[in-house]
Amino acid sequence: MSQINHYINGARDNGTSSASQDVYNPATGEVQGQVLLARADDVNQAVAAASAAWPAWAALPVLRRARIMDKFKNIVNERAAILAEAISAEHGKTHDDALGEVTRGIEVVEFATSAPSFMKGEYSEDVGSGVDSHMIRQSLGVVAGITPFNFPAMVPMWMFPVALVTGNCFILKPSERDPSASLLMAEWLTEAGVPAGVFGVIQGDKLAVDTLLAHPDIKAISFVGSTAIAQYIHATGTANGKRVQALGGAKNHMVIMPDADLDMAASALMGAAYGSAGERCMAISVAVPVTDAVADALIERLAPQVEALKIGPATDRASEMGPLVTAAAAERANHYVTKGEEQGAKLVVDGRNFKQDKQGYEKGFYVGGTLLDNVTEDMDCYRDEIFGPVLSVVRKNSYQEAVDLIHGHNYANGTAIFTRDGDVARNFSKDIEVGMVGVNVPIPVPMAYHSFGGWKSSIFGEHHMHGMEGVRFYTRIKTTTTRWPSGMRADPQFTMPTLG
Ligand code: NAD
């Protein structure tokens, strides 16, 4: 059984605490490792190592830091399959899905390699007679990232490549449910040339997070996870004087207009609702067909595909969907389906009794693909984020009713519309109050050089992640105004300096 430890000062570290937690293989349902749970001492040690490393790291020319990121990118590219296997083993997602996650993470590293360009400052000559002014971006110091289980490599990579290349030191507190990817990335960063202390990993739970939130030497916190915790992290971190970006949960709607290509919409829904077993913050969990005729035609296409989903372990490369991350997550998804039916939804495909018959995998945390029709706004399965392979169909009669539905929900991470009408598509993307919008694109995750983030209860804090928003989050600007002796006035000036 493996022991998953911390990464402090450039090496794996067992820390000072003997507390640990089981790490499961969700495909078999068996415990496969133990992750250490840090005490405050361990967190303090990682922060001290990072604080000591920061001045030299921040002073390194940005091109050098970018070259280290380039080396890291090449290592991750070469070993993508190793990282993907580590992800699948603890998370349960299929191998190809895990590879896709790694690719989306590498894209942020790639963006970070362009830091010499995006870290360029601004210069104004002659802001006054003989006076020049320039603005530069400088790092904050030691920053921390707290990440969820559903993307154990990609979400940390939304954060640390930008934080590091802009001159910060970074401490990662990954999810305790799938912690191994963090250690691989830490070792590969060291191999790429990141000096000891600049990147650290602290395994742990609330105690580790609270220690980071209270630590005076942590200047900023990036968080991705559920909304209740995001809200707590934002409130506590900002009360302690830190910059905080905290991304929360989601309930993403896809509107299907009567003129949409229904085969294309159904196929898009299959991937967006059931890919990664619905454990994506950008998963489509609500389909909103406009008119009953569209709803009937859509369900006719979806139901046989949902029933035919190939559900199995990542080791079987033919699997289209894996298990959920824990037994509790599977039970929770099933509970919402039962509640939905009790509250009046029509169960078109029931995944609750799915049995995995592959030998050795019978006890895995599998839930079958589930399709609920006639779901309404008041039902729990509509209001709450289920984070499982459950698609709810909410029927609406007009475009405006569909928009009103979306605007009535607390979450506003992503949304999509399927239509052939340019006017409708344009109005939707302009008017909808959601952070990320797809037009005939079901999972509109922005590329690394744009920024990722939702609105309303899907985010707390001002800055989205990666792209220039990430750069702004991890840097502070300094503006210097310069005059040389030849331009100096001899007499003192007591009034506010003006152009004069
Ligand atoms: P989670 O909120 O349970 O955990 C996230 C992190 O917070 C973990 O590192 C965990 O150890 C820590 N944590 C948990 N409870 C805590 C507490 N009481 N105090 C302090 N720290 C605590 O989330 P999860 O179940 O790992 O991930 C799934 C959630 O993440 C879903 O809600 C999903 O929508 C969301 N998510 C959002 C985005 C986004 O970009 N908006 C992306 C991915 C996941």
Image (cartoon, rainbow, N blue to C red):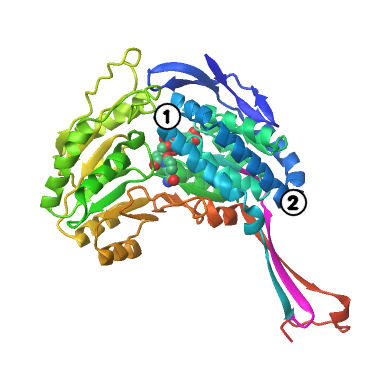
User: Which residue carries the number 1 mark?
Assistant: 95
Judged from this view, the residue extending furthest toward the bottom is 500
- Magenta segment's dominant SS is strand
Residue at image location 60% in from the left, 38% down from the top: 74
What residue type is disc 2 on?
A: Pro
Task: From the top left corner, tell me how far across and down residue 431 is, in percent.
Answer: 32, 64
Task: From the top left corner, tell me how far across and down residue 148 is, in percent.
Answer: 46, 37
Residue at image location 36% in from the left, 56% down from the top: 434
Other residues around mark 1 within 10 Å, as few (<14) / some (14–19) / many (≥20): many
Write the start and end of the magenta stretch as one range: 128-143
Q: Which of marks 2 and 1 is nearer the N terminus?
A: 2
User: Which residue carries the number 2 mark?
Assistant: 61
Circles 2 and 1, Cβ within 8 Å, touching? The answer is: no
Q: Quadrant of residue 268?
A: top left
Secondary structure at numbered mark 1? helix
Which corner quadrant holds the C terminus? Answer: bottom right
Please tell me which residue lies in front, 78 or 108.
Answer: 78
User: Gap between marks 2 and 1, in whole Å?
Assistant: 38 Å
Task: From the top left corner, tell me how far across and down residue 197 is, in percent.
Answer: 70, 36
* In this view, 474 is above or below 179: below
What residue type is disc 1 on?
A: His
In this view of the protein, can residue 380 be seen by the observer? no
Disc nearest the viewer among 2 and 1: 1
- In this rendering, position of residue 418 left or right of residue 168: left
Other residues around mark 2 within 10 Å, as few (<14) / some (14–19) / many (≥20): few
Q: Quadrant of ligand 1?
A: top left
Residue 25 is inside the magenta segment: no
